[in-house]
Each structure stands twice: as structure tokens, then as C-alpha cells.
Amino acid sequence: MNTNSSPAGAEVVTLASDLIRIDTTNTGDPDTTVGERSAAEYVAAQLEDVGYQVTYLESAPGRANVITRIPGADPARGALLVHAHLDVVPFDASEWRVHPLSGDVDDGYLWGRGAVDMKHMAAMTLAVARQFKRDGTVPPRDLVLAFVADEEAGGVFGAQWLVKNHPQLFEGVSEAIGEVGGFSVTLADDVRGYLVETAQKGSMWLRLTARGVAGHGSMIGHDNAVAKLAAAVTRLEQHEFPLVLTGPVRDFLTVVGEISGVPFDEDDPQAAVARLGSLSRMIGATLRNTANVTVFQAGYRDNVVPSVAHAVVDGRFLPGQGEILERDVRAVLGPEIELQVRSLPAVETTFDGHLVDRMAAAIRTQDPTARLLPYMLSAATDAKSFQQLGIRNFGFVPLRLPPDLDFTALFHGVDERVPTDALEFGTAVLQSFLSDC
Ligand SMILES: [Zn+2]
């Protein structure tokens, strides 16, 4: 398949650019979150334009989700869900080379907030779906396309809401693809590895409270809540959680070693991670549980010692390690710190089976020497919600990237952008993949 001759490839950049120009900034506050309705209406119009029927659902005013089911040749097979979120994180336009809502093409890149997180996938999915309708392509199994709100604030008005309130839309879905994966890293001269997300860490947010004795700031004090909490979070920041080599990380580093010619030494995973360049920040976070303090709140007046202080710790745990992380954090903080814990499970599947074979075959139609690598994402996605329906989740948004691009830094980053030829590549791969999944 030649990407240049594909009509889907020809319209994907326009679709992605149009979506970027619709401001869908998710502030985390429903009152100031904008644009999801306009983006969802745009998506629905693109699908209806070629003859699809869509389900349009608002979980709250403006918090819009669009779902469509493309019937497959064999309804007895489990359906495949393809999901993308339409919201984006906020930006400070003054820091950008181009305006983050411009959706401009320059220097071979499409620029703007959402270019890689993840209006690109929404656009690629739309382009392929539109092409299927024009060609009369019937996929081998049902496809469920979901364009959802609110992923950047946990999916409360998007994936989570749909799974809780409209599970029938996902009836029969056995597998899903979504963010974050499918992008290439150049591991040897002209040999690219494509990362497929097969696991993601669990999330654990811990609200810490320290209590002490209130008093006048001028007097000899004792039992200061602020100082106690500060000491506890400092201990936590200095604590290194034990290294645990999990299956997906071992598999990832083994394949990297094979391709790069530097065999993976299981006794020294950190050295292997250090050789990954810009990717090491993300992969390094999947070698162990982590806990970073993100919020510290205490005090209300210069001359008053408050009786209470609060902090929030963002913890992330490896699959099966939730209780271990909580136990370790409690031990480091000590008995005087009260904890409230809210967590979301890890996600994990195996890197095998027909769907994985098809991912590899589809990528190789465009990049014949490509290798696929399973990996674990350190962050969270809507896969956490879809997992509740018993769905196997993969991160697979195919993109062939130039070797020098620090791709992971573009997520939520300044000057977020995606190569236009990567969008065309991804559309061709997705078309091949969804035609024979
Ligand atoms: Zn995202």
C-alpha cells in the first residue's frame, strides 16, 4: 500500500488540523472546560457525512461523547474498540512557537495542542472509517469507534461515565486500542521498534494530614504540624522504592537489546534504561513504584502556628503492587501522618495472539523491517475504565517518527506537534490493521 495514493491519508491532516482548531481545553473544572461539544459535533458530522449512524451522548451539558459501531463480517467474533479522547490539557500560548490552536502545517509538522494527545488518533480513525464507507469495506469483526470527553481529568464525564451508564454500547467488545503506543523509536540504523502498550501502572493518590498544637508564632513551640509534614514528605522524596523487573519491562528491554546489539543484562536493568535516551524517563518509571509529592497546603497567617497541614502524593504502582506501595508509603511517612487513599487499578494484558500479529503485519506493510515491542506506560489512560468491562487493552496509535524527535516530551508539552508523514503512515497502517483484525 502506498500511503501517498490513499484518499484516507490525503484527508487525515485536514481532519487533525480541524480538530486542533477546536479548543477543547479540559481545565479539570466542568465550569471552565470548553469545546468538547463542538469537537464531538465535528466528529459526528464527518461520520454522518459518509453514511454512518452515530450515538451522541452528553454526560453533562457540553461533555459530549460520540460512538458508532461498524458491523463486521463475523458478528460472532468479539468486537474491537478503537477509542480516542477529544479533550486536551491547558496551554500557555506565550511559550509556543506557533499558537497552540492554529493547527498549522509548517516544516513537515502539524502543530498544536492535541497533535499527539490525541486528536491525531481521532483524525486517523475518522479518515479510515470514512474510507471504509467509500470503498464498501466490511471489517472482519464489529468495530466500535468511541470519541470521548474528559480523559485528561480522569474520564468522569467520558469513558468512566459511558462504562457505568451505557455499557451496552460496548457489548461483545473483547479488545481495544487507544493511547499510548504504536510510535517508533529508532534502535539501529534504519531499524525501528514500535512500542505497543500492554500494561500501565496503577494510580494511587494519597492525601496526607499532619496534626499538631496550634499557637502563637512568637512563642516556644512544640509539635508543629507543618514541620512534621515537611519532614515526612522529605523522607518520602528521598526514599527509593525497590526495583521490580516485571514481564512487560523485561520483554521490552530484551527486544531493545536484540535490535541494538547490546544484550540486556537482567542484573542491571537501570543501565539498559539509561541507554534509551529520552525514552528513559518514561521506561525508568516502570522499574519500580513511585510516589511524588504534588500538593502542600498549610497555614493561614504569618504569626499563627496552624494545628493541621495537608499534602498530596501522586503514587504509581506496578501491576499487583498496590498494597505494597501503600504499605511502603505508610512506613516511610510514619504513624503520625494520617492517610486517605484513592486508587485506580493497573492495566495488564499479554503480548500475543491474533491482534498483536495483525499489528505487526500492518506496520510492516509500511515499514518492512519494523519490530514490535511490548511496554508498560507509567501514566493512566481511559484503558482503566474499559478494563472494567473485561476488555483487553492495547496502546496502539501507529506513527513512524524521525530518530531525533523527543516524542514523549511532546505529551502535554510546549510546541506539541506531529510529522504529517507520520499521520499518513499511521492512517495507512490503521487502514490495513482494521481491514483484517
Ligand atoms: Zn491522552
Image (cartoon, rainbow, N blue to C red):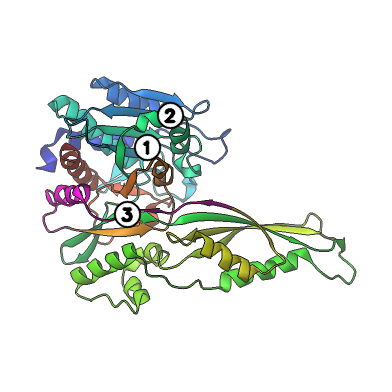
Point out residue 243 in the picture as x, y percentages from the top left corner: 43, 72
Three-letter residue code for mark 1? Ile
Residue identified by numbered label 2: 166
Q: Which residues are magenta?
A: 342-370
Q: Secondary structure at mark 1?
A: helix
Look at 15% across and 41% down and name the residue there: 432
Badge 3 residue CB within 8 Å of ligand 1: no
Magenta stretch: residue 405 in it?
no
Q: Amino acid at mark 3?
A: Thr
Residues under labels 2 and 3: Cα distance? Answer: 25 Å
Labels 2, 1: front one:
2
Q: Secondary structure at mark 3?
A: strand
Which residue corresponds to the image point at 13% horizontal and 40% vertical from the top-left?
Answer: 4
Residue designated by label 3: 198
User: Viewer-proximal residue, 72 or 269?
Assistant: 72
Q: Secondary structure at mark 2?
A: loop
Please give the residue where the numbered disc 1 appears in the rendered image. 20
At which x and y percent is residue 311? 66, 58
Cα–Cα span, label 1 and label 3: 28 Å
- Left or right, 289 with respect to 196, comes to right
Distance from label 2 to label 1 (Cα)? 28 Å
Is 308 positioned to the left or the right of 30 in the image? right
